[in-house]
Amino acid sequence: MAEIFGEIKKIAYEGPGSRNPLSFKHYDPERVVAGKSMREHLPFAMAWWHNLCYCGQDMFGSITMDKSFGAQPGIMTHAYSKVDAGFEFMQKLGIDYFCFHDTDLIPEACDINETNARLDELSDYIIKKMQETGIRCLWGTANMFSSPRYLSGAGSSNSADVFAFAAAQVKKALDLTVKLGGRGYVFWGGREGYETLLNTDVKFEQENVAYLMKMAVAYGRKIGFSGDFYIEPKPKEPMKHQYDFDAATSIGFLKQHGLEKDFKLNIESNHATLAGHTFQHELHIASMNGMLGSVDANSGDLLLGWDTDEFPKNVYDATMCMYEILKAGGLSGGLNFDAKNRRASYTHEDMFQAYILGMDTFALGLIKAVALIEDGRIDEFVKERYASFSTGIGAKIRRKETTLEKLADYASEMKSLELPGSGRQEYLESVVNSILFG
Ligand code: XUL
Ligand code: CO
């Protein structure tokens, strides 16, 4: 078969000194770091939607990118050419996973039966490609936000028929995820949220969203899906108030509705910053609750208040991300580049360049996070900071052996109360800088 990206050869590791734009400077897949190869530490995934479907359109202008991939006009011919392009792209970059929405694979038909038949046909072809290349599916999901029927949400819709249609879409997307051997299934909130309380019953809507998830778990387990379901938190956009605002809100929701055993979180960097948190904060909250499942590796722009879905380039953020992932013992999911080229970067080469940037950024993040952990000064300081809880009254508090009365007696006998030990933030920040820059 003729190559689609014929002008681009397989991307090789050439080291930090290389000036070849089509080479990795830091991502060396077989290099072993902290006992595992970089490839194992960094289960990179290609996002079908941004890489193979997004053509550069924005609110003010039309497409700038040609993603026809040589297809003749025709619905399924283009769907097939996207599969060919995607697999060639992943092979040339050495990416082991992909993620998809149902409607990324094929355009929807007017009749759901026809849509499902298209999905069945195309997924047979994807399986063939997976067998030929060894590339796997990280996670699948259903697009329940683009179609006009979801104008008021899917699980949170005011229309029972729309709710039922959404359930049918989830069922099919789960069938596909299982067929393709996906590790996970994602619920990103889409339009599950609201614009005004003047027309919204939040409790009613959230109960319905939870019920849709419950039915998804029941069906998924019935058809042999043994992976994790994920909620992908996001605070706003498209809705003003999204129900899955951030990690803490989503965990509360999952626990409230008894979903916490089947669900983990898919943390996206750009969503974290939109919620007013750092990427590391969101990863940390998920991790300390045993719910860090997967990551949408991208980056926002702190000067812009919306989801820009840029490729990761900030080594500091990638380091703190990998720090949390390493401390959590790795990911059961992966690192999905939910990111798109800027509108003016419209060539095929730009598509490769974007992934090289993202993969090199995470490779550096991994190397630096391992160094930070091996250095030990941060861990040591945090431990020392809470040392007053290791002995005496502190130890009793930790063992939950005190009462307010006992502590009041203890306080009344204090001769003086010293300030807590210094937080030493600036010192710790300079430790991080010294690990990053020598
Ligand atoms: C939207 C977003 C989605 C999810 C999957 O902001 O991140 O692409 O990752 O639906
Ligand atoms: Co995402």
Image (cartoon, grey):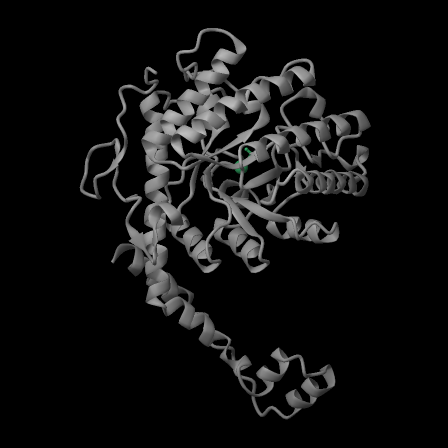
Point 40% across, 28% down: residue = 132
Q: Is residue 175 above or below residue 429?
A: above
Q: Is residue 288 above or below residue 230?
A: below
Quarter in which the C terminus is drawn: bottom left
Q: Residue furthest top?
A: 73
Point 41% across, 36% down: residue = 311
Q: Is residue 416 visible?
A: yes
Q: Is residue 205 above or below residue 79?
A: below
- In the rendered image, residue 403, in percent from the top left (x then y), is placed at 72, 83
Q: Is residue 259 left or right of residue 20?
A: right
Q: Is residue 242 left or right of residue 309?
A: right
Classify the position of ligand 1 by quadrant: top left, top right, bottom left or bottom right: top right
- In the rendered image, residue 337, in percent from the top left (x then y), is placed at 45, 36
Quarter in which the N terminus is drawn: top left
Along the line of sight, which residue is nearer the eye, 138 or 312? Answer: 138
Point 45% across, 76% down: residue = 384
Q: Is residue 260 left or right of residue 426?
A: right
Q: Is residue 305 visible?
A: no
- In the rendered image, residue 392, in percent from the top left (x then y), is placed at 57, 88
Along the line of sight, which residue is nearer the eye, 49 or 413? Answer: 49
Where on the picture, by quarter, is residue 172?
top right
- In the rendered image, residue 23, in percent from the top left (x then y), is placed at 25, 35
Number of on-image labels: 0
